[in-house]
Image (tube, rainbow, N blue to C red):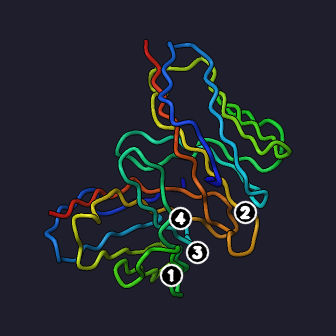
Amino acid sequence: GAVVSQHPSWVICKSGTSVKIECRSLDFQATTMFWYRQFPKQSLMLMATSNEGSKATYEQGVEKDKFLINHASLTLSTLTVTSAHPEDSSFYICSAEGTGGLEQYFGPGTRLTVT
Amino acid sequence: QKEVEQDPGPLSVPEGAIVSLNCTYSNSAFQYFMWYRQYSRKGPELLMYTYSSGNKEDGRFTAQVDKSSKYISLFIRDSQPSDSATYLCAMRGAGGTSYGKLTFGQGTILTVHP
């Protein structure tokens, strides 16, 4: 149980375009999902927290207009990187927390490369 | 000073060795402590989850928390080459604005060689 999937696993896009990443909890309902970014050989940095049906809460320094987060259902959250630039190239990972649970389960990650 | 400090290693041990991984933290609001294992280009996998001070054992893994010293450890017994990965400690507060937010250590790269 507690499986989280992400799609796509790897994406290459051109500078200036937008990319959407999906995060799904497959076998449980997630009231809260989190989006992280991880640069090579570095730890995970929390970007934002999304709660189903409400606006996401962004961490300091994260541009909310650039990283659009939508948590439309209890099993799906999406991250859209708008007007992507090469410096947005990174490994994006989501996690999901179930109702009443304290544990976070992570997706496999999405590697974004902006050329 | 970072809220969570973790020696990045790398740490290289022979198969069968006991591995000790550690993190220190400065924020006394942290109440929940986790250890994750991350293989290259994969998402973190939850290994252990603890709340109170003391030890928690699960198979070859033992998690230890000392809240008075703000120090947590993960011990791996009879280490295997398949244990080679990056190990991340993570912690979170119990409520308020920090609820649910995990703060990660830098991660320790572990290699277990046959």
> Which residue is label 3 attached to?
A31
Instruction: Give the residue pinned by disc 1.
Output: A56
Give the class, few, some or many, for how many residues have Cα within 10 Å of label 3's Cα (few <14, many ≥20). Answer: many
Q: CA distance from mark 4 to mark 1?
A: 14 Å
Q: Subunit of mark 1?
A: A
- Left or right of B93 on screen, residue A81: left
Q: Badge 4 is on which residue? A: A96
Residue in view at x 70 percent, y 31 percent: B62
Q: Amino acid at mark 1?
A: Ala
Helix, strand or loop for disc 3 = strand
Tell me how far mark 3 sits from mark 2, CA to CA.
18 Å
Q: Are marks 3 and 1 on the same chain?
A: yes
Mark 2, residue position: B93
Q: In x, y percent, where is residue B76?
A: 62, 26
Task: Give the vertical position of B36 relative to B32 (above or below).
Answer: above
What element does badge 4 sit on? strand
| Count of number-bearing discs | 4
Q: Amino acid at mark 2?
A: Gly
- Asked whether the residues under marks 4 and 2 belong to the same chain, the reply is no
Which subunit holds the residue at mark 2?
B
Corner quadrant of residue B89: top right
Q: Quadrant of the C terminus of chain A?
A: bottom left
Q: Is the residue A42 above or below the residue B100 in the image? A: above
Q: Nearer the viewer, mark 3 or mark 2?
A: 2
Query: Separation of disc 3 and disc 4 at Cα?
Result: 8 Å
